[in-house]
Image (cartoon, rainbow, N blue to C red):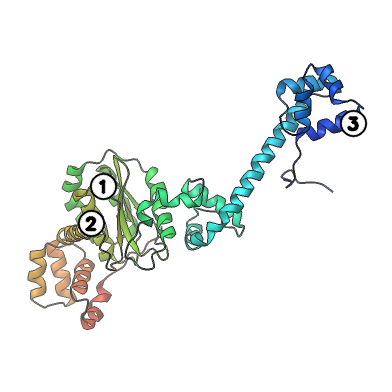
């Protein structure tokens, strides 16, 4: 029978076991060995009792007495210590499997984008998650993704999935080189950003948008939507000099994408670095409601100035040709105009039925 080079027995043996067997084969007592090596009988006994290791110096002495190499004894000790670490890690992974149920949904999402190992083995799943979150225990994930785990009134939000989604954004943002955040440059770049709303090619859009954002010090990250997170986007700071705008492309609608983007821009321009802003699907959350309303107003006014919008809807002419003409006039995508009208008249099924088809979607691959 040939053993695999990766054979890892569950029972391991201290070098003291081999030492006792060697003494027996040489018909030598512990006291005799002490006399031949200059070590104390106590030292010999503690090695055999598995209370002390075989040191490199001791290995040299044993080699002289038994006619072996010092490496023989050193390897016994080194392998024993490696096996101890392996068994301790194995026990730790086994203990951590109690957390897996909470991470089951996000694990499936993470497999899709190649962030964790695709396996059924529970301990391998734990190991992948620990590496992904860079924590020593899955119980510590709330400590590094506080915003994802704090209390809110959003129902059915899977906090572990939200934490994983944010972590994906963090990992991508770490690889994006940006200059220090320049608030004034961001403000002056808004007209250029706004003009991109008329670009319908998602690949071209992504390249140009990331380039502009990098220029004023923001890492723009698109992470696919994770099931049960109900999140459209987030704005937060990976450090004091590097903010992140993270988008999920949830629904792929052009109007939703740009509203979310400028909503997060509003947070970066108007609000502090200490807060982590997560843009959930609207569900009555009152945490930071005033700040969210400010960001909403900023997004609305940036995309379509309120005065111009009021004048347009006051005419009650929502034909596609009128919407297209108004969109050209204000310099945004017709989808954004259609989406704004749909939201204004969200209780009107008739208007939704007419205008929803005008809300075009990005064709994306992320």
Element type at marker 1?
Answer: helix
Is residue 143 visible to us here?
yes
Element type at marker 2?
Answer: helix
Q: Which residue is drawn at the image coordinates 41% and 47% (left, top)?
A: 171
The residue at which mark 2 appears reads as 262
Q: Which residue is drawn at the image coordinates 86% and 23% (left, top)?
A: 66
In the displayed structure image, the side of residue 317 where residue 93 appears, left or right: right
The residue at which mark 3 appears reads as 24
Whether label 2 touches label 3, CB < 8 Å: no
Q: Depth check: give the residue in front, 300 or 83.
A: 83
Q: Depth check: give the residue in front, 309 or 232.
A: 232
Is residue 67 visible to us here?
no
Q: In this view, does 21 lie above or below 104?
A: above
Residue pushed farthest bottom? 350
Which class describes the residues within 10 Å of circle 2: few (<14), some (14-19), or many (20+)?
many
The residue at which mark 1 appears reads as 212
Question: Where is residue 260 drawn, in percent x and y?
Answer: 26, 60
In whole angstroms, how far apart are the C-alphas of marks 1 and 2? 14 Å
User: Nearer the N terminus, badge 1 or badge 2?
Assistant: 1
């Amino acid at each position: 029978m040939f053993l695999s080079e990766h054979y890892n027995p569950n029972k391991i043996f201290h070098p003291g076991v081999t030492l006792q067997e060697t003494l027996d084969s040489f018909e030598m007592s512990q006291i005799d060995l002490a006399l031949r090596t200059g070590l104390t009988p106590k030292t010999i006994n503690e090695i055999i009792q598995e209370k002390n290791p075989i040191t490199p110096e001791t290995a040299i002495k044993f080699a002289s007495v038994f006619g072996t190499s010092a490496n023989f004894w050193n390897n016994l000790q080194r392998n024993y210590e490696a096996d101890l670490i392996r068994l301790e890690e194995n026990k730790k992974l086994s203990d951590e499997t109690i957390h897996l149920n909470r991470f089951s949904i996000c694990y499936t999402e993470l497999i899709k984008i190649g962030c964790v190992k695709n396996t059924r083995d529970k301990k391998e799943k734990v190991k992948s998650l620990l590496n992904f979150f860079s924590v020593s225990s899955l119980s510590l994930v709330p400590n590094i993704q506080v915003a994802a785990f704090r209390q809110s009134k959003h129902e059915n939000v899977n906090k572990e999935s939200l934490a994983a989604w944010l972590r994906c954004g963090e990992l991508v943002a770490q690889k994006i080189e940006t200059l220090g955040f320049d608030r004034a440059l961001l403000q002056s770049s808004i007209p250029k950003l706004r003009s991109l709303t008329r670009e319908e090619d998602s690949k071209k859009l992504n390249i140009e948008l990331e380039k502009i954002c990098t220029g004023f010090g923001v890492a723009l990250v698109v992470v696919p939507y994770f099931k049960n997170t109900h999140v459209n986007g987030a704005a937060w700071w990976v450090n004091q000099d590097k903010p992140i705008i993270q988008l999920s492309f949830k629904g792929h609608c052009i109007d939703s994408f740009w509203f979310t983007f400028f909503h997060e821009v509003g947070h970066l321009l108007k609000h502090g670095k200490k807060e982590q802003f997560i843009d959930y699907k609207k569900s009555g959350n009152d945490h930071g409601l005033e700040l969210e309303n400010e960001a909403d107003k900023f997004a609305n006014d940036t995309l379509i100035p309120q005065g111009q919008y009021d004048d347009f809807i006051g005419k009650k002419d929502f034909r596609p040709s009128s919407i297209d003409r108004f969109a050209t006039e204000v310099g945004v995508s017709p989808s954004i105009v259609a989406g704004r009208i749909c939201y204004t008249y969200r209780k009107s099924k008739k208007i939704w039925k007419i205008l929803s088809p005008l809300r075009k979607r990005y064709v994306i691959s992320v």
